[in-house]
Image: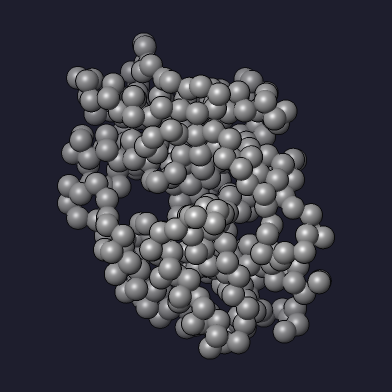
Amino acid sequence: MSLVKDNIIIGIDTSCYTTSIAAISLDRKVIFNERIILDVGEKSKGLRQSEAVFQHVKNLGTIVESMKKLMTKHNVAAICVSDRPRPMEDSYMPVFKVGENFAQLTGCMLGVPVYLTSHQENHIEASLYTNNMKGSDKFLSVHMSGGTSEVLLVSKLSESNEDVNELYNINIVGGSKDISFGQLIDRVGVNLGYKFPAGKYIDENAINCNIKISQGLKTSVKEGYINISGLENQIYKIDESKEYTSKLTLDSIVRSVYKSVVYLSEKYNLSEVLFAGGVSASKYINIELTKKLRQGNITAYFTEPQYSTDNAVGCAIIGLNKFIRQKKS
């Protein structure tokens, strides 16, 4: 198939809490980006994989209905889907198999290539979409989501690399040793009486809280790795307003990530860090971390909420990069 003007690349991502399909044109314009957040019951702190799988199957059918108009105007040149959480051989979650099977079936029917990627790479690429990093060939990326809190050393592979499916070399160099920041925020939020996921309520509270934090929570960070469960135990002992508790929670995340990033930036001689994942959509974290890291001569790159929360735009971009690379080879 030639690189014609009306060709598009489809991206698909079926994560633990969101069904996502996106489409990008060959000149890298996002022309479709639809997401359906999975339904989580009242007072629940999450979804079982079996429940999420069932909802993904239903949601994909719903999104396809809204794609019909798009398909009448464009040709699908390729499909890219996240088939696992991380770019590692033993990385697996049932939810991603829903999207992979849907992509393989659609690709077979349309006669187009289907590329595989990971949910983590999808997040990184989506965050890069709106950022023009000076050192985009090698940088730190902090992936903060409901299930992941990792600091990654990301190196872009040369276009001469023989494997078209490999675009990055990603190594975990820091992050959480126990629960994730997303889990911390949601557990605190549910404990305060908010519906899961509770991130937006905690963020709004923190932004609107005018009380200055006199003494923050004790953080435990060693060589880039963070103990988050210790923060959770401290928060539950606090007898303060919802607003102040929310601010204290996010402040502890900011200070923990700051210590980790500063240590790793010095270790790897890097001065740029890219933030990805749903937790990075927090306005409070964005503002405070950007300010603190700037004081340490480290540039922080955040992106718009539609590209930081779960989406499939990153998959579509990765698919486009692999499609072009394959055409060149």
The image shows residue 327 at horizontal and vertical percentages of 77, 74
Above/below status of 320 relative to 72: above
Q: Is residue 13 left or right of residue 216?
A: right
Q: Is residue 301 visible?
A: no
Q: Is residue 265 visible?
A: yes
The image shows residue 72 at horizontal and vertical percentages of 55, 87
The residue at 37%/78% (across/down) is 61
Relative to the observer, which residue lies in front, 60 or 285?
A: 60
Q: How many marks?
A: 0
Q: Is residue 200 left or right of residue 329?
A: left
Above/below status of 75 relative to 215: below
The image shows residue 192 at horizontal and vertical percentages of 20, 34
Above/below status of 269 relative to 199: above
Q: Residue furthest front?
A: 90
Q: How is the image coloured?
A: one colour
Relative to the observer, which residue lies in front, 62 or 52?
A: 52
The image shows residue 160 at horizontal and vertical percentages of 82, 60
Above/below status of 24 relative to 91: below
The residue at 62%/82% (across/down) is 112
| Quadrant placement of the C terminus | bottom right
Q: Is residue 117 left or right of residue 322?
A: left
The residue at 49%/59% (across/down) is 84
Residue 94 lies in quadrant: bottom left
| Quadrant placement of the N terminus | bottom right
Residue 134 lies in quadrant: top right
